[in-house]
Amino acid sequence: MNDINIDELSFQYDGNSIINNINASIKSQDIVSIIGPNGSGKTTLLKLIAGILTPQSGNVLLSGSNIQKIPAKIKSKLITLVPQNPEYPENMRVFDYVMLGRNPYLTAFKWENSADKKMIREIMSDTNTLKFIDRKLNEVSGGEKQRISLALAMAQGTRSLLLDEPLSNLDISNQAVIMQLIVKNHHERLGPTILSIHDLTIAAQYSDRVILLDDGNLVAYGTPNSVLTQQNINKVFNIDVAILTNPNNGNLIISTN
Amino acid sequence: MKYIVGILILLLTIIFATSIGSVPIDFDTILKSIVSKLQLWNFDEPINEITETVIWNIRLPRVILAAIVGASLGLSGATYQGVFRNPLADPYLIGVASGSGLAATIIFVSGLPLIIFNLNLLPIGTFIGGITAVMCAYMISKISQSRSITTIILAGVAIGAFASALSGILILKSDPDVRPLLSWLMGGFISGQWNKVIFLSPYLCFGSIIIYFYARSINILQLSDDHAASLGVNVRYIRFILIMASTLITASAVSFSGIIGFVGLASPHTVRLIWGEDYRKILPMSAIVGSIFLVVSDLISRIIMSPSELPVGVITALFGAPFFIYLLIYSGKKIK
């Protein structure tokens, strides 16, 4: 099993509490969305789960092992975090960028071989990025960049994938394309997918579980239907919403009143 | 392939630069002299002894010294740019060169012996000066808690200016007899000799091996620190090692050639615009391009106002800057 267990996790920065005593058990087969207002601690929680930040107290357990104790190189084969708005070095070729994802499997003396190159081509074909393989990164659009950065994460071949706002700055059609890629990729991996997201309707549509954060506290954790209630949303976001059902597919639609 | 072409152009440039001077020597003679000196072939007619002396004792050491310093500056510039994820980083701008220069000035002015127990103090002193400058810049960016990586560059600019000002005061206050010794601070290879070449080469070799060892990691440092950490890179450790290695190379170059701007900035940029952003190519090509650039600049500096010489730093800026501006505009146009 590749479950992730978050155990009494707390994190402070400069004396301010960012994450307060969070407990959650994330199953390996789940896509989990972290939602909450700006500054509620979504990014910090993701960095703690990925082991990039060290908590003051509590643990993150990856398949039962404390993430802080796993050596960096091994950890990078198990779990990865795609940050919000990744850097795209403008003169770097798209292919070389995606290849950076193979780093955990390479050393100073063992560079990428033909198997790695073949794998990158396959991933680029899956993410529909193969057609600009030889372009530089400053020659592709925002939606294309998101697909490229997803391809980089997929090249890393980790069991668990964390994504910090993978839909920022995307139009509605690119949002759907990216979410479908994330779901498809999730089924090809053995571990959970955890993403922070602002659009509650998209969170409801694509996730198995939703974590609702407010000011570093876990307000609710469960299925979209149980977490995305008028009461919860009103409490955390301070706004009145209507929760409707899409007549075509039965998904929740959350709209302000 | 591009490396072979690059090295060939460098060799041709070196021979060309050796052939030009108050006494012109033709290509043919220089090639013959080199071939017979390396004992690859014995020619029937020996080369004129005076010509031989001019080639081996005056021109070639100077040209080779310029080539090594150019390679050092190009390589360390490329490394700083990669490590700080900033195209403005170069040994001159982030204060390393000025820090090294200040240390060298202190050593000269204080009248310390240059050699103690067969150990040349100058490169050690300049290394300490350079490392102090870059560490100060790093601390300032930490204390300011700025998340922007630009802060370290700006701090470096300030520290560099401060160090240069201190050097200026020290030089003015110094014994008039010492001042000529300090003229090299302006940058130049007037007294290029083989012993300097022999001294400098190990620093460049050692530094480049360490830097090239991490070339692939520098590519990953082009992502954010968190992203690089997610990919299994120990960002702080690698950054530290690379800063030490490139400062060592810069400091050793400064200790023999003075402060020469622009080579470390322009060479990696030129390479990046032409061959793209892969540090496994950027590092060696920046060294080659920096080398060619400085050999040509040094040649121009000694012939343009012959018999007097201009500081080579003047030439690198005078010819490098317009070329660099042209490149920037041209590469901007290519991107729609």
Image (tube, rainbow, N blue to C red):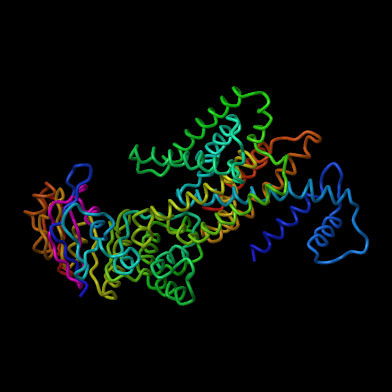
Q: Quadrant of residue A194?
A: bottom left
Is A146 above or below relative to B327?
below
- The residue segment tinted magenta is A19-45
Is B261 above or below relative to A24?
above
Question: Is B255 or B75 nearer to us in this picture?
Answer: B255
Magenta stretch containing residue A30, yes or no?
A: yes
Left or right: residue B292 versus residue A203 is right
Q: Quadrant of residue B91?
A: top right
Question: Is B78 or A240 nearer to us in this picture?
Answer: B78
Q: Position of residue B40 (x, y in %)?
A: 80, 66
Is B32 above or below relative to B58?
below
Extreme residue in the front direction = B117
Residue A249 visible to an observer of this rendering: yes
Extreme residue in the left direction = A231
Magenta stretch containing residue A70, yes or no?
A: no
Q: Quadrant of the N terminus of chain B?
A: bottom right
Q: Position of residue B19 (x, y in %)?
A: 82, 50
- Which residue occupies 47% across, 66% down? A108
Left or right: residue B19 versus residue A27 is right
Question: Is B206 or A101 nearer to us in this picture?
Answer: B206
- Which residue occupies 28% across, 71% down? A159
Left or right: residue B202 versus residue A145 is right
Q: Position of residue B128 (x, y in %)?
A: 50, 41
Q: Position of residue B262 (x, y in %)?
A: 60, 42
Q: How many numbered dots are placed on residues in this image?
A: 0
Residue B329 visible to an observer of this rendering: no
